[in-house]
Image (spheres, rainbow, N blue to C red):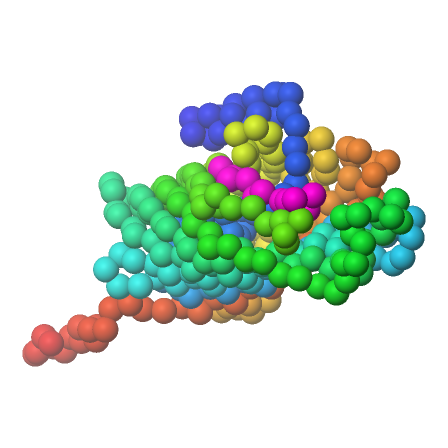
């Protein structure tokens, strides 16, 4: 109970601190269900299963441009994670984030090392991969038709850069804490035009949750995600409730942006397939955004056994 109180206190303090935010990396409402995106140390932390998750987010649905069609941000994320022998873990994530004429893509591989400490797990992880950005000049509409920067630009162009992230995570029976730093390789993409220069900021993430049993069939889980580039920051937190370890639902709030409802369930009795949904309702800066966002998740879990030795078999006379 003391750990739960401390987590709540941290959440309340964060929600009452003045803040400013800028969305550069993708944001997801179901962050507590897919921590690998934020932290490479989570790779293989589930020591008895391979897990793959597909997530689609449509942000500010119904937003209308003053010209042309579309323009609302959409994001797709695929993650996969599995444990390896000797306390190792491996993970993969692919991201496609479309923001108007700009498309950001990531291909990242994560590797982690787990240490068992007093019944808990400490994991450290490294992620390496590529960050790519594609720009479609045909979608730009300059306010000044004679803008010298955009004259003659047509078609699409892509640039990429290597990317590295580090993370550490701690998991006990109930408590989960993860701290990571992403985009550690400094780079900027400008497509040969200084006016289009886009420097990707380093991000530091703190993810925390604590599962606490209410009754034999009910559990609750306060959760918190803090993201900062050391200049601005974004904070969100909420509460999940689990029933029979099969169904879940919850409420979340992203400071100055949106309130959210989360729902999910396992589809099969063996719990290999599960689905989740999050509905965001914009409460901040509503003049520049549409009111609602939707997020859909599908997850597949395959139990695995790392040991290659067959289990011992006993008979009344012989032991093998």
Residue 2 in percent (x, y) is at: 42, 26
Between 53 and 3, the one nearer to me in the picture? 53
Left or right position of 185 against 71: left
Residue 179 in percent (x, y) is at: 43, 39
Q: Residue furthest left?
A: 317
Report the residue at 59% width, 38% height from top: 239
Residue 175 in percent (x, y) is at: 42, 39
Q: What is the quadrant of residue 102 in the picture? A: bottom right
Instruction: Determine if residue 108 is in view.
Output: yes
Q: What is the quadrant of residue 307 in the picture? A: bottom left
Left or right position of 39 against 139: left
Between 112 and 8, the one nearer to me in the picture? 112
Vertical side of 108 occupied by 280: above or below: above
Report the residue at 86% width, 36% height from top: 287
Is residue 52 highlighted in magenta? no
Quarter of the image containing the N terminus? top left
User: Magenta residues?
Assistant: 194-205
Left or right position of 75 against 91: right
Instruction: Determine if residue 58 is in view.
Output: no
Is residue 201 highlighted in magenta? yes
Vertical side of 77 occupied by 183: above or below: above
How many marks are shown on the rendered structure? 0
Vertical side of 44 occupied by 183: above or below: above
Left or right position of 155 against 81: right
Quarter of the image containing the C terminus? bottom left
């Amino acid at each position: 109970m003391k750990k739960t109180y401390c987590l709540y206190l941290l959440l309340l303090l964060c929600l009452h601190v003045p803040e400013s935010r800028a969305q550069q990396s993708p944001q997801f409402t179901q962050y507590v269900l897919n921590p690998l995106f934020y932290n490479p140390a989570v790779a293989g932390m589930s020591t008895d299963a391979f897990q793959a998750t597909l997530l689609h987010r449509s942000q500010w649905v119904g937003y209308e441009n003053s010209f042309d069609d579309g323009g609302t941000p959409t994001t797709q994320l695929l993650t996969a994670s599995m444990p390896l022998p000797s306390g190792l873990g491996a993970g993969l994530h692919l991201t496609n984030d479309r923001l108007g004429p700009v498309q950001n893509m990531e291909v990242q591989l994560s590797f982690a090392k787990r240490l068992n400490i007093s019944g808990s797990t400490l994991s450290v992880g490294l992620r390496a991969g590529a960050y790519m950005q594609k720009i479609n000049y045909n979608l730009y509409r300059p306010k000044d038709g004679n803008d010298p920067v955009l004259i003659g630009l047509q078609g699409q162009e892509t640039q990429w850069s290597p990317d590295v992230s580090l993370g550490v995570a701690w998991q006990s029976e109930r408590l989960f804490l993860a701290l990571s730093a992403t985009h550690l390789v400094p780079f900027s993409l400008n497509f040969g035009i200084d006016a289009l220069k886009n420097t990707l900021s380093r991000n530091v993430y703190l993810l925390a949750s604590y599962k606490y049993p209410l009754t034999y069939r009910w559990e609750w889980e306060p959760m918190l995600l803090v993201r900062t580039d050391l200049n601005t920051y974004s904070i969100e937190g909420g509460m999940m409730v689990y029933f029979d370890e099969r169904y879940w639902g919850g409420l979340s709030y992203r400071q100055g942006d949106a309130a959210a409802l989360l729902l999910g369930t396992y589809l099969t009795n063996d719990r290999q397939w599960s689905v989740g949904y999050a509905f965001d309702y914009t409460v901040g800066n509503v003049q520049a955004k549409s009111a609602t966002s939707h997020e859909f998740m599908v997850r597949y879990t395959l139990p695995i056994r790392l040991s290659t030795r067959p289990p011992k078999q006993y008979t009344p006379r012989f032991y093998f």
